[in-house]
Amino acid sequence: MQTRRILVAPLDWGLGHASRCVPLIRRFLQEGHTVTLAGTGASGDLLRLHFPALRFLELPGYAIRYPSHSGLVPYLGLQIPGLLRSIRKEHDWLEQLLKQESFDQIISDNRYGLWHPAIASVILTHQLYLPLPTSMQWAKGLVQRRLHSWLNRFGEIWVPDHPGRENLSGGLSHPAPGNLRVEYIGPLSRFSTVSLQQVQQKTLDVVAVLSGPEPQRSLLESRIVASYQHTTMKVRIITGQPGVDRTRDSSGNIEFVGHLADEEFIDTLKRAGTIYCRSGYSSLMDLDALGLKAVLIPTPGQTEQEYLAEHFRMKGWEVLSQSELSK
């Protein structure tokens, strides 16, 4: 097999995009390829934690911030000009990088500007269709055409899911539109290559796995704390903040952990009586790989997570709205 020079760059909205790139990067390294990473923020920190020996390039993020209320779509609508500028900037960033060095392949996780006509360009995504709220259905055709025009700039589209009816992403990526070059590569989880140990006892009452952009990440954290801080239940909150030290709240029953190595993360989840997490697709792939279920709390107003939560509710999972937790 001919070795390749591969650039891997995940989106920086939360940790999920970086997390699902981990098994791909491991595979590339096992095959002897040279891998360069690019990113920013907490997702970049996650990649550096997993691959400290690899070269890392700072690539500015999209700087999208979620609202504290549930009107996400109108709020994001106001940020569309900035989003389009960010896509152009990351394409310009790539053009400048390629003037100094060369790559044989680009793996872009939901970064629509990281493509090049002269290089094998792959976009990793589970979103071939974007769910819109009822109030935005009039724009469905326009949004889908724009999305597909971005996707078609890439030579290949990799969907991290199964192709058939027994899939995880449902209508977000099934069936594949006929105008897209789609390959279903199977679910991706950083836990898929970790040996799983049988846990006999549930020594943690609650584990909450937090993720996603601010301020919604912190808002969910505060509601979890309010729900359990005056109880005797043993709670661990994984805050999704690599590099942040472990702490406890004033009552002592809630432990905060910024990030855990894969083995300890798995052990924590398996010892949990109840798991809370967002219905982000990467989190769902991780839970599926471990054979675990969680109480899903979609980010308010984020239609993709709301769709996935309902999709998994039909599979027997419990779903709560964020407002149903204690204030």
Image (cartoon, grey):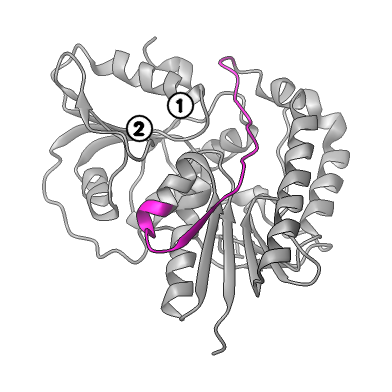
> Residue 315 placed where, x, y %?
47, 45
Please tell me which residue is depicted at 58% across the width and 70% down the height of the picture: 6
Residue occupying image coordinates x 76% and y 51%: 92
Extreme residue toward the front, this view: 100
Q: Which residue is mark 1?
A: 217
* 273 left or right of 90 in image: left
Inspect the magenta stretch and tell me whether residue 316 lies in it: no
Do we see residue 182 in this rendering? yes
Give the SS element for disc 1.
helix
For this rendering, which residue is in front, 52 or 251?
A: 52
Whole-number angstrom distance, CA of label 2 to CA of label 1? 8 Å
State which region is magenta. 48-69
Q: Relative to 96, does residue 309 appear above or below in the rendering? A: above
Q: Position of residue 11 (x, y in %)?
A: 59, 46
**Which dot marks residue 280?**
none
**Number of the label disc, if any, that sits on residue 239:** 2
| Amino acid bearing label 2 | Thr
Q: Residue at x 33, y 21 (%)?
A: 224
Which of the marked residues, 2 or 1, is nearer the chain's N terminus? Answer: 1
Residues marked 2 and 1 touching at CB (< 8 Å): yes
